[in-house]
Structures are given as C-alpha cells and as structure tokens.
Image (tube, helix red, strand yellow):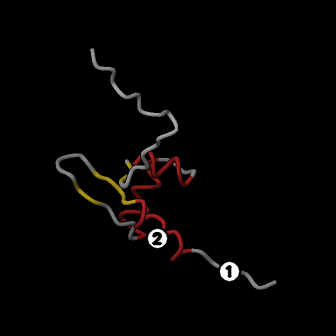
Amino acid sequence: MHKRKHVSSATHIHPMLLTIAQVATTLGVGRSKVYTFIKQEGLPTISLGRGLTRVSVVSLEQWIQQRETRHNT
C-alpha cells in the first residue's frame, strides 16, 4: 500500500484575487464602502462572470499607494 505525502500545514497559498468581503476586511471598512471605492474612486475590479467580482491584490496595493499622502513634520 502506498502512503500519500502529507502537505505541510506550513504551506500557505496567498490568493491573487480577493472577494469584496476580503477587500473590506483588508481595508477595515464595510462592503458598501468598497463598492463606493469601485464606483467613485476607481478601485479596479475583475469580473469572473455573473456576480463574481474580484479585486487583484496587486491592483489593491497600487490603488492604496496612489492615495497615500505624506505629511512633512
């Protein structure tokens, strides 16, 4: 009998695309605010079909960096 290899629990796959709920959690805002960001602030999305809207992790990071302000002290 062959033994199956056990995948280490230390292996973690990082998603490339986030759901709206995941984006909301990441940003610390509600889902409705994420939709506002999409419609009014240009947060890029990817449509994977009917009702499947996702946000690229890379695009989210870039979108955040574009809005980052630096204050001189």
Farthest residue toward the top? Answer: 1
Instruction: Rate crowding at label 1 as few (under 14), some (14 to 19) or many (20 or more) other CA atoms within 10 Å.
Output: few
**In the rendered image, the vertical position of residue 41 relative to residue 53, given as above or below:** below
Q: Position of residue 43 (x, y in %)?
A: 39, 66
Q: Are marks 2 and 1 in contact (CB under 8 Å)?
A: no
Residue 56 found in image quarter: bottom left
Judging depth in this view, the residue of 29 and 1 nearest the camera is 1
Tag 1 residue: 70
Spatial CA span between label 2 and label 1: 15 Å
Q: Residue at x 47, y 34 (%)?
A: 8
Q: Label 2 neighbourhood size at 10 Å, few (<14), some (14-19), many (20+)?
A: some
| Amino acid type indicated by mark 2 | Trp
Q: Quadrant of the C terminus?
A: bottom right
Instruction: Give the percent coordinates (x, y) of residue 27.
Output: 54, 55
| Badge 1 amino acid | Arg
Task: Tell me what residue is drawn at x 43 percent, y 70 percent.
Answer: 41
Residue 47: mark: none
On the image, the x and y values in percent for residue 20 come to 39, 49
Q: Is residue 13 above or below residue 63?
A: above
Say the numbered circle drawn on residue 63: 2
* First-in-chain label (2 vs 1): 2
- Asked if residue 66 lies left or right of residue 41, the reply is right
Q: Is residue 24 above or below residue 3?
A: below
Q: Nearer the viewer, residue 42 or 19?
A: 19
Residue at figure coordinates x 44%, y 64% from the top left: 60
Residue 9 coordinates in the image, percent (x, y)? 49, 33
Q: Is residue 2 left or right of residue 32?
A: left
Residue furthest out toward the right: 73
